[in-house]
Image (cartoon, rainbow, N blue to C red):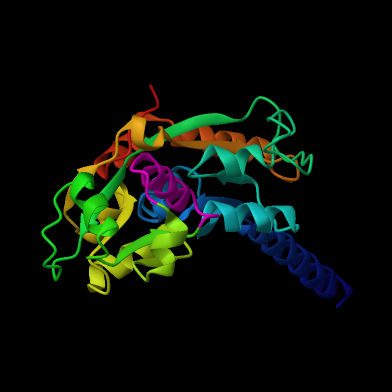
Amino acid sequence: MKKIVSLLLAGMMVLSLAACGSEKTAETTELYVFAAASMTETLTQISELYKAENPAVELVFNFDSSGTLKTQIQEGAVCDLFISAGQKQMNQLDITADPEVNTEGLDYVLEDTRIDILENKVTLCVSDTSEAGIETFDDWAEALKNGEILMAMGNSDVPVGQYTQKILAYYGLSEEELAGAGTISYGSNVKEVTTQVSEGSVDCGVIYCTDAFSAGLTVTDAATAEMCGQVIYPAAVLKTSENQELAKEFLAFLQTDACMEIFEGVGFSRVQ
């Protein structure tokens, strides 16, 4: 009888150890990636490629305006990798940046991980329902000046909104006066601006070419570097990350030819 009990106990131990081993194999590491809203479609697609090669890693994305993401990071949100649609928001977290930009002396960017990963284009898109006849930024500026159109743009804390502000300044237009005249409709991120154009609630909007592509909108004109500067997306691993090496590996993965092909397919380009 004792022998039978011993065998049963031994069998139970084997099963228990096997179950523990199975649980360990099934464990996954969550990697938190905060990325500009304009990267939603591309990173979602890229995540499938990454999962195929790294089944033990679960990518957790947070897509929003770069300004909102920067604030969330500063307030303690769990984030391993940050990809911004503008240099300003990354600089505000980088202790090595100009103190006139990083006014709070924030130190979140891990040394030697920051890289300019992509370039985008700021474009003018006109709603299908608009009868304003806008085809270029010159037309856009003239129509705004005359109060003939309703234009959608990002808020001032959103990179696409900041690029739009530069274009307005390039044409000598006052955002405050235009907003007061009711010719501007705002969005809290580029996706909201894109939606307003898609739904025809505005005549036109200033968005990235990648968002225009994803939404099936027609780009009527593209802003030059003289009008708003280059649209560079910096990326960096954060010092607060508990998975810094894994975050570095994913950032390197994003720079592979396979990923760049996906990025370029919607209008992004490598930084020259």
User: Is 122 displayed left or right of 100 in the figure?
Assistant: left
Q: Is residue 260 above or below residue 27?
A: above
Judging depth in this view, the residue of 51 and 221 nearest the camera is 221
Residue 160 magenta-highlighted: yes
Q: Residue at x 63, y 51 (%)?
A: 70
Nearer to me, 55 or 118: 118
Residue 43, horizontal then vertical, whole percent = 42, 50
Query: Relative to 116, does residue 140 appear above or below in the rendering?
Result: below
Give residue 147's position: percent from left, percent from top. 27, 64
- Tell which of 40 and 137 is nearer to you: 137
Q: Position of residue 94 (x, y in %)?
A: 69, 35
In the displayed image of the protein, which residue is found farthest to the top? Answer: 272
* Placement of the N terminus among the 4 image quadrants: bottom right
The residue shown at (42%, 47%) is 52
Q: Is residue 158 above or below residue 93?
A: below
The image quadrant that residue 11 belongs to is bottom right
* Picture quadrant where residue 72 is located: bottom right
Quarter where residue 98 is shown: top right
Per the rendered image, the range of residues in magenta is 156-173
Farthest residue in the bottom direction?
A: 1
| Residue plotted at (38% across, 59% down) | 153
Q: Is residue 172 visible?
A: yes
